[in-house]
Amino acid sequence: MNPERYEQGLATRRAVLGADYVDAAIASADDFNRPLQELVTEYCWGDIWNRPGLDRRTRSLLNLAMLTALNRPHELKLHVKGALNNGATKEEIREVLMQTAIYCGVPAAVDSFRNAREVFKELGV
Protein backbone atom coordinates (compact mmCIF):
# COMPACT_ATOMS: atom_id res chain seq x y z
CA MET A 1 0.00 0.00 0.00
CA ASN A 2 1.14 3.53 -0.79
CA PRO A 3 0.54 5.48 2.45
CA GLU A 4 0.56 8.89 0.73
CA ARG A 5 -2.02 7.85 -1.88
CA TYR A 6 -4.10 6.19 0.86
CA GLU A 7 -4.16 9.43 2.90
CA GLN A 8 -5.08 11.46 -0.20
CA GLY A 9 -7.83 8.96 -0.90
CA LEU A 10 -9.09 9.13 2.65
CA ALA A 11 -9.29 12.92 2.46
CA THR A 12 -11.13 12.82 -0.88
CA ARG A 13 -13.46 10.07 0.26
CA ARG A 14 -14.35 12.07 3.39
CA ALA A 15 -14.91 15.25 1.37
CA VAL A 16 -17.26 13.53 -1.06
CA LEU A 17 -19.13 11.02 1.12
CA GLY A 18 -18.86 12.66 4.51
CA ALA A 19 -16.40 11.98 7.30
CA ASP A 20 -18.95 10.20 9.50
CA TYR A 21 -19.76 7.60 6.84
CA VAL A 22 -16.13 7.04 5.84
CA ASP A 23 -14.81 6.90 9.39
CA ALA A 24 -17.50 4.37 10.31
CA ALA A 25 -16.61 2.22 7.29
CA ILE A 26 -12.92 2.28 8.20
CA ALA A 27 -13.57 1.68 11.90
CA SER A 28 -15.86 -1.28 11.23
CA ALA A 29 -13.37 -2.99 8.92
CA ASP A 30 -12.19 -6.36 10.12
CA ASP A 31 -9.58 -8.84 8.94
CA PHE A 32 -11.94 -10.01 6.20
CA ASN A 33 -12.91 -6.71 4.56
CA ARG A 34 -10.05 -4.38 5.59
CA PRO A 35 -8.11 -5.16 2.39
CA LEU A 36 -11.13 -4.03 0.36
CA GLN A 37 -11.41 -0.78 2.36
CA GLU A 38 -7.71 -0.14 1.75
CA LEU A 39 -8.02 -0.91 -1.97
CA VAL A 40 -11.03 1.35 -2.43
CA THR A 41 -9.48 4.17 -0.43
CA GLU A 42 -6.09 4.03 -2.13
CA TYR A 43 -6.99 3.34 -5.75
CA CYS A 44 -10.55 4.53 -6.21
CA TRP A 45 -10.41 7.64 -4.02
CA GLY A 46 -6.65 8.28 -3.94
CA ASP A 47 -5.89 7.67 -7.58
CA ILE A 48 -8.93 7.88 -9.86
CA TRP A 49 -10.89 10.56 -7.98
CA ASN A 50 -7.80 12.78 -7.87
CA ARG A 51 -6.91 12.58 -11.54
CA PRO A 52 -6.91 15.98 -13.25
CA GLY A 53 -9.05 15.07 -16.30
CA LEU A 54 -12.50 15.49 -14.68
CA ASP A 55 -13.77 17.53 -11.77
CA ARG A 56 -15.48 15.88 -8.82
CA ARG A 57 -18.96 17.05 -9.86
CA THR A 58 -18.58 15.33 -13.23
CA ARG A 59 -17.20 12.17 -11.63
CA SER A 60 -20.19 12.12 -9.27
CA LEU A 61 -22.68 12.45 -12.11
CA LEU A 62 -20.95 9.65 -14.00
CA ASN A 63 -21.12 7.46 -10.90
CA LEU A 64 -24.89 7.97 -10.67
CA ALA A 65 -25.32 6.72 -14.23
CA MET A 66 -23.02 3.74 -13.71
CA LEU A 67 -24.59 2.77 -10.38
CA THR A 68 -28.02 2.92 -12.00
CA ALA A 69 -26.79 0.65 -14.79
CA LEU A 70 -25.37 -1.76 -12.22
CA ASN A 71 -28.51 -1.62 -10.03
CA ARG A 72 -26.64 -0.72 -6.85
CA PRO A 73 -29.19 1.25 -4.76
CA HIS A 74 -27.12 1.50 -1.57
CA GLU A 75 -24.15 2.93 -3.44
CA LEU A 76 -26.44 5.15 -5.53
CA LYS A 77 -27.88 6.78 -2.40
CA LEU A 78 -24.41 7.36 -1.06
CA HIS A 79 -23.29 8.92 -4.33
CA VAL A 80 -26.38 11.13 -4.61
CA LYS A 81 -25.18 12.69 -1.36
CA GLY A 82 -21.68 12.86 -2.82
CA ALA A 83 -22.93 14.52 -5.99
CA LEU A 84 -24.70 17.17 -3.93
CA ASN A 85 -21.52 17.66 -1.86
CA ASN A 86 -19.61 18.10 -5.12
CA GLY A 87 -21.92 20.85 -6.36
CA ALA A 88 -24.35 18.92 -8.56
CA THR A 89 -27.89 20.22 -8.46
CA LYS A 90 -31.08 18.26 -7.99
CA GLU A 91 -31.96 19.15 -11.59
CA GLU A 92 -28.65 17.80 -12.91
CA ILE A 93 -29.14 14.58 -10.98
CA ARG A 94 -32.63 14.30 -12.46
CA GLU A 95 -31.25 14.73 -15.99
CA VAL A 96 -28.62 12.05 -15.44
CA LEU A 97 -31.30 9.66 -14.21
CA MET A 98 -33.56 10.54 -17.15
CA GLN A 99 -30.71 9.62 -19.50
CA THR A 100 -30.30 6.30 -17.71
CA ALA A 101 -33.94 5.48 -18.50
CA ILE A 102 -33.01 5.33 -22.17
CA TYR A 103 -29.60 3.69 -21.94
CA CYS A 104 -30.02 1.48 -18.85
CA GLY A 105 -33.75 0.79 -18.92
CA VAL A 106 -36.80 2.34 -17.36
CA PRO A 107 -36.96 -0.04 -14.36
CA ALA A 108 -33.40 0.86 -13.39
CA ALA A 109 -34.15 4.57 -13.69
CA VAL A 110 -37.37 4.23 -11.69
CA ASP A 111 -35.44 2.63 -8.84
CA SER A 112 -32.76 5.32 -9.00
CA PHE A 113 -35.33 8.10 -8.96
CA ARG A 114 -36.95 6.48 -5.92
CA ASN A 115 -33.64 6.22 -4.11
CA ALA A 116 -32.58 9.76 -5.03
CA ARG A 117 -35.90 11.11 -3.71
CA GLU A 118 -35.24 9.35 -0.39
CA VAL A 119 -31.88 11.11 -0.15
CA PHE A 120 -33.37 14.48 -1.10
CA LYS A 121 -36.04 14.07 1.56
CA GLU A 122 -33.48 13.02 4.17
CA LEU A 123 -31.29 16.05 3.36
CA GLY A 124 -34.15 18.51 2.84
CA VAL A 125 -33.15 19.16 -0.78
Image: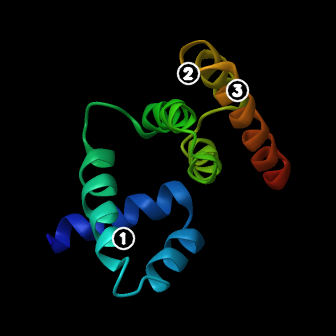
| Residue 44 vertical position relative to residue 33 in the rendered view, above or below | above
Of badges 1 and 3, the one in the foreground is 3
SS of the residue under disc 1: helix
The residue lying toward the viewer, choosing from 53 and 80, is 80
Coordinates of residue 58 in the picture (x, y in percent): 45, 31
Identify which residue is drawn at 34% across, 87% down: 31
Coordinates of residue 84 in the picture (x, y in percent): 63, 43
Rendered image quadrant of residue 46: bottom left
Q: Which mark is residue 19?
A: none
Instruction: Choose the circle earlier in sequence order: 2 or 1.
Output: 1
Quadrant containing the C terminus in the rendered view: top right
Report the Cα–Cα distance between label 1 and label 3.
31 Å
Quadrant containing the N terminus in the rendered view: bottom left
Identify which residue is drawn at 67% across, 32% down: 89
The amino acid sitting under disc 3 is: Pro
Identify which residue is drawn at 21% across, 64% down: 5
SS of the residue under disc 2: loop
Query: Within 10 angstroms of label 1, few (less than 14), some, or many (20 or more) residues?
Result: some
The amino acid sitting under disc 2 is: Cys
| Residue 111 vertical position relative to residue 2 in the rendered view, above or below | above
Residue denoted by label 1 = 37
Coordinates of residue 120 in the picture (x, y in percent): 79, 45
Report the Cα–Cα distance between label 2 and label 3.
8 Å
The amino acid sitting under disc 1 is: Gln
| Residue 46 vertical position relative to residue 23 in the rendered view, above or below | above
Of badges 2 and 1, the one in the foreground is 2
SS of the residue under disc 3: helix
Are discs 2 and 1 less than 8 Å apart at CB? no
Query: Within 10 angstroms of label 2, few (less than 14), some, or many (20 or more) residues?
Result: some
Disc tally is 3
Residue denoted by label 2 = 104
Residue denoted by label 3 = 107
